[in-house]
Image (cartoon, helix red, strand yellow):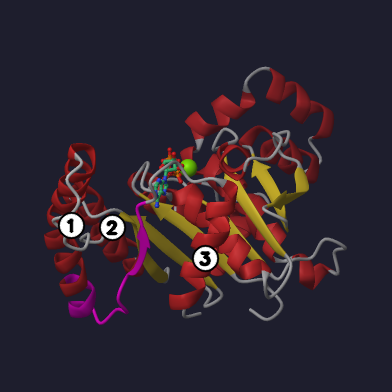
Amino acid sequence: MPDVAPLHIVSGKGGTGKTTVALALALMLRRSGETLVCEVESRHGLTEAAGVAKIPEGQERSVTIAGQKLRMLSVDSRHALRDYLDHVRLGVAGALLDKTGFADFASELAPGLRDVLLTGKVYQAARRRMKGHPDAVDAVVMDAPPTGRIENFLTAGEALAEVVVVGPIAPQAQSIMALLRAETTQVHLVTTCTEMALTETLATIDALTGHGIAVGHVIVNQVMAAPPPLPDTVTEPALRIAWERDCAVAAEQQPWADLLADRLSALGRRPALTLPLLPDEVAPADLVRIADLLAEGWDA
Ligand SMILES: Nc1ncnc2c1ncn2[C@@H]1O[C@H](COP(=O)(O)OP(=O)(O)OP(=O)(O)O)[C@@H](O)[C@H]1O
Ligand SMILES: [Mg+2]
């Protein structure tokens, strides 16, 4: 698909660091061109994590994170549905239907429709260059739904094509599936060194590749490296307790890191990228540091 901006879809188990990684990845990609980071109904997760002002649903803005500019968009299914209804010339009727809860009705009727409309918005953004759009971007990053939902989310177009065979949504759903399977699209999976997150990650690699959707990098976040031995001169109890706690976390994580390395190697995949557990919540300046760490191991 020439002229379609590469699409990086970031998923992972809830709370592992999807939003953090999506933002850091967008900052990394920003170094080589205009980049859009978008979320799909994540309730202002991106703006909150980036420390920027809230962006109204469905709107796109230029934001500055630690001195670096990015485009940011929050895609919401109501706006996506309204645009779609406008597109199929249901304008006023569409707005009325929407008011009467058409969005909910539509998601009951054709559960995949909502997801297809959301992905459709991201799809349009990736294709701006083809259309000579003034806000064309060179890369798109999606802060995507968690691993528990990502397979259904990304394959909604296929499910929908089976139930809706007439109208413009069917070919649109097919184009979206084609984009998701294109070599310009990759799903990156964020995990932590815990049994549950790793199990979900490995199952998701299997499921997505089964659908012909490429899994790019696996990113192990919040990794505690084994701390160096504590010199005998350190006697302060608080420091000792902190050191022992870090050693215990590192020892607990190690077997899972080893297991992941084995499984990825058995699958013939490149090793996971590792991001450290920071002492505090991730601040905007940390995102730049994480972007540097990603850049070190990133392999397009
Ligand atoms: N490497 C890290 N070190 C320390 N804290 C981190 C790290 N990565 C993420 N966090 C913190 O963990 C919390 C969850 O991160 P984030 O919001 O990126 O996860 P998520 O997967 O997007 O969560 P959700 O499933 O709720 O959308 C945030 O408070 C974030 O600041
Ligand atoms: Mg998030």
Question: Dot 2: within a 10 Å radius of its alpha carbon, few (fewer than 14), some, or many (20 or more) residues?
Answer: many
Question: Dot 3: within a 10 Å radius of its alpha carbon, few (fewer than 14), some, or many (20 or more) residues?
Answer: many
What label does residue 230 carry, if any? 1
The residue sitting at 37% across, 57% down in the picture is: 190
Instruction: Tell me: 155 left or right of 91.
Output: left
Asked if disc 2 is less than 8 Å from ligand 1, the answer is no
What residue type is disc 2 on? Thr
The quarter of the image holding the N terminus is bottom right
Instruction: Tell me: 286 left or right of 222.
Output: right
The residue where tag 2 is placed is 201
Instruction: Tell me: 174 left or right of 202.
Output: right
Percent position of residue 293, x then y: 47, 68
Start and end of the magenta stretch? 263-277
The residue sitting at 52% across, 33% down in the picture is: 107
What label does residue 180 carry, if any? 3
Percent position of residue 199, x then y: 20, 54
Is residue 49 something one can see in this rendering?
yes
In this rendering, the count of numbered labels is 3
Most extreme residue toward the top is 100
What residue type is disc 3 on? Leu
Percent position of residue 246, x then y: 21, 49
Given residues 18 and 210, the one toward you in this image is 18
Position of 198 relative to 108 (above/below): below
Disc 1 element = loop
Are circles 2 and 1 on residues that touch, CB within 8 Å? no
